[in-house]
Image (cartoon, rainbow, N blue to C red):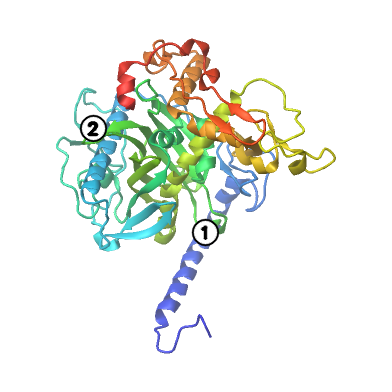
């Protein structure tokens, strides 16, 4: 029979595999029986049920349209964290150092022909031109047994110290790295003395990702930028990184005129718990510092970076008493222009679920997490479309009896929207179903994790116009609006743009059959006072 071992094949390995599965499951079930009271406290009632009014300190599993269950913490689950100037400087130095190390690794990767050696790397996934590799087991260098996670404290040394501050969770001293090794490891492509190599736990696979994606560098960075809880949750919905809960613990750096995508902050999130692993694998959470912005490579070329790097704060301890395992991760993405309408992506990092999660499951989760970058540009287009829709011209819905694109007559007595026509959510013109494009937009993400989506229709002209919008300009405008609403001054005083303007983008015109000739003016969506001033010279040089 097909599927059964053929005569002569060793059946002991198959039996050993199933025996291991049964032993692993029995161990987990035994633990669950011991921690039954903890499980009851965690969900409020037996597994699989819901409770309508959760207590103040309980988790909530709430149904959403995307998933049956959603894991969230109470709003006040974590205390308000006030980072000292010394702590902020240490985080900034560490983030900038990690980015610099990965940029150097990217330069070496390009110099070697942008090829990974098959003897050292194993291909795991490919998605939309982006390939994911993991280090082969034989190339993993065994290091010290204790994992090393960056911990930022209030040390006794002076804040003006120029050395890198680094310590491990279990060490009693601070390692000061003065002379970082510049030689790259042949197996990983990263300097052996780098922060990422030192923080990677023993046995954790180093991940590599490279490839090309359609779009621009500006779009890619616009999709990465998420400086507040609302934008972070929206980004998570669109790029599908499978987060159940997300909190910004502290913000350290914000956008400037020279770099409107600059951000550095401490974030906590809980990964989605797969339904098939309920009762088998514990929930995972992560505490990371996220950093994004522009920098330069060794040749002076402008490139973008996006960093997610695990850290430890004493104010945000591990939630072991609630049965949650704190995972470790470090991924640094480098984006650079690869030609007209093309972005080259390069990534190095690791993902360690910790606990007793099988290695294959952890590797699959790591590959899925790394490939979320392929959705960043599409999310940038959605952000532009949403921004354009919020600033649409005032006016009522068109009462035309024909499609303003192809002149097709509408059936007034039809009960279906396809024959009655639809209205563009931006320009309010009426179109037939063939001349409109439906888009599912996220309208709201509540604190409980529930997502409200709405299907809207747009004409081709509005979609093309939104795609051509400059994310750089939108990010600056949103940053100023946010600072004015909060009543506080921006991170950089120049962010007020007293000497800053929006450059007028050439009007786009969509010619189609019929009377519909849609003309757009980018300046009509911008503040009146910002149309005649000039860009600072340093901004123009950086954007060139």
Give the image location of residue 347, x and y in percent: 33, 46
Q: What residue sits 39% from the left and 18% below the top?
A: 491
Report whether 30 appears left or right of 332: right
The image quarter containing residue 429 is top right
Q: How many marks?
A: 2
Task: Name the residue beneath numbered marker 1.
Answer: 280
Specify few, some or many for label 1: CA neighbours under 10 Å numbering under 14, 14-19, or 20 or more: some
In-image side of 167 versus 452 (left or right) = left
- Mark 1 secondary-structure assignment: loop
Q: Residue furthest right?
A: 413
Q: Is residue 76 visible?
A: no
Q: CA distance from mark 2 to mark 1?
A: 50 Å
Specify whether 144 is left or right of 229.
left
Badge 2 crowding class, 10 Å Cα cut-off, few under 14, some 14 to 19, many 20 or more, is few
- The spot of residue 354 in percent (x, y) is 39, 52
Q: What residue is rendered at 67% in x and 28% in y?
A: 428
Answer with mark 2 or mark 1, whichever residue precedes in sequence. Answer: 1
Instruction: Give the quarter of the image for residue 105.
Output: top left
Relative vertical location of residue 114 with respect to residue 517 in this rendering, above or below: below
Tell me what residue is drawn at x 50 percent, y 58 percent: 31
Under tag 2, what secondary structure? loop
Determine which of the numbered discs, if any, sits on residue 523 in the image.
none
Is residue 245 visible from the viewing direction of this image? yes
- Give the labeled residue for mark 2: 300
The relative height of residue 474 versus residue 107 in the rendered view (above or below) is: above
Q: Nearer the viewer, residue 246 or 174?
A: 246
Question: x, y percentage for residue 52?
Answer: 70, 41
The C terminus sits in image quarter: top left
Q: Depth check: give the residue in front, 365 or 526.
A: 526
């Amino acid at each position: 029979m097909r599927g059964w071992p053929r005569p002569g094949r060793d059946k002991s390995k198959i039996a050993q595999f199933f025996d291991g599965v049964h032993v692993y499951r029995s161990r987990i079930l035994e633990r669950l029986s011991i921690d039954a009271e903890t499980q009851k406290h965690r969900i409020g009632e037996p597994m699989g049920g819901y409770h309508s009014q959760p207590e103040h300190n309980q988790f909530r599993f709430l149904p959403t349209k995307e998933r049956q269950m959603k894991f969230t913490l109470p709003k006040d689950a974590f205390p308000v964290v006030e980072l000292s100037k010394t702590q902020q400087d240490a985080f900034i130095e560490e983030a900038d150092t990690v980015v610099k190390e990965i940029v150097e690794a990217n330069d070496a990767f390009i110099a070697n022909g942008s090829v990974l050696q098959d003897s050292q790397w194993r291909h795991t996934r490919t998605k939309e031109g982006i390939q994911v590799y993991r280090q082969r087991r034989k190339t993993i260098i065994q290091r010290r047994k204790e994992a090393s996670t960056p911990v930022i404290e209030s040390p006794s040394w002076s804040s003006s110290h120029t050395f890198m501050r680094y310590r491990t969770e279990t060490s009693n001293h601070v390692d000061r790295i003065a002379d970082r090794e510049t030689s790259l490891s042949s197996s990983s492509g990263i300097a052996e003395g780098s922060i990422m190599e030192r923080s990677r736990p023993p046995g954790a696979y180093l991940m590599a990702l490279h490839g090309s994606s359609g779009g621009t560098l500006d779009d890619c960075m616009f999709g990465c930028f998420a400086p507040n809880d609302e934008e972070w949750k929206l980004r998570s919905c669109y790029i599908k990184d499978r987060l159940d809960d997300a909190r910004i613990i502290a913000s350290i750096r914000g956008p400037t005129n020279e770099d409107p995508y600059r951000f550095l902050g401490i974030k906590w999130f809980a990964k989605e718990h797969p339904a098939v692993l309920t009762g088998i694998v514990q929930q995972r959470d992560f505490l990371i510092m996220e950093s994004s912005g522009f920098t330069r490579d060794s040749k002076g070329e402008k490139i973008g970076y996006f960093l997610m790097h695990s850290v430890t704060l004493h104010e945000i301890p591990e939630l072991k008493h609630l049965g949650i395992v704190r995972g470790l991760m470090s991924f640094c993405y480098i984006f650079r222009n690869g030609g007209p309408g093309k972005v080259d992506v390069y990534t190095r990092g690791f993902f360690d679920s910790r606990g007793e999660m099988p290695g294959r499951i952890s590797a699959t989760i790591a590959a899925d997490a790394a490939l979320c970058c392929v959705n960043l540009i599409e999310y940038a287009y959605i952000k532009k479309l949403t921004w354009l829709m919020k600033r649409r011209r005032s006016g009522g819905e068109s009462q035309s009896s024909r499609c303003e694109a192809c002149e097709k007559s509408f059936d007034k007595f039809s009960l279906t929207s396809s024959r009655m026509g639809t209205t563009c959510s931006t320009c309010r013109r009426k179109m037939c179903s063939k001349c409109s494009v439906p888009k599912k937009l996220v309208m709201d993400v509540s604190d409980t994790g529930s997502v409200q989506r709405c299907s809207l229709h747009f004409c081709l002209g509005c979609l093309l116009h939104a795609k051509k919008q400059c994310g750089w300009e939108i990010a600056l405008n949103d940053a100023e609006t946010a600072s004015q609403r909060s009543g506080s001054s921006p991170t950089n005083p120049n962010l007020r743009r007293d000497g800053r303007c929006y450059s007028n983008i050439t009007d786009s015109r969509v010619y189609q059959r019929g009377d519909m000739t849609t003309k757009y003016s980018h300046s009509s969506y911008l503040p009146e006072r910002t149309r005649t001033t000039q860009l600072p010279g340093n901004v123009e040089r950086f954007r060139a």
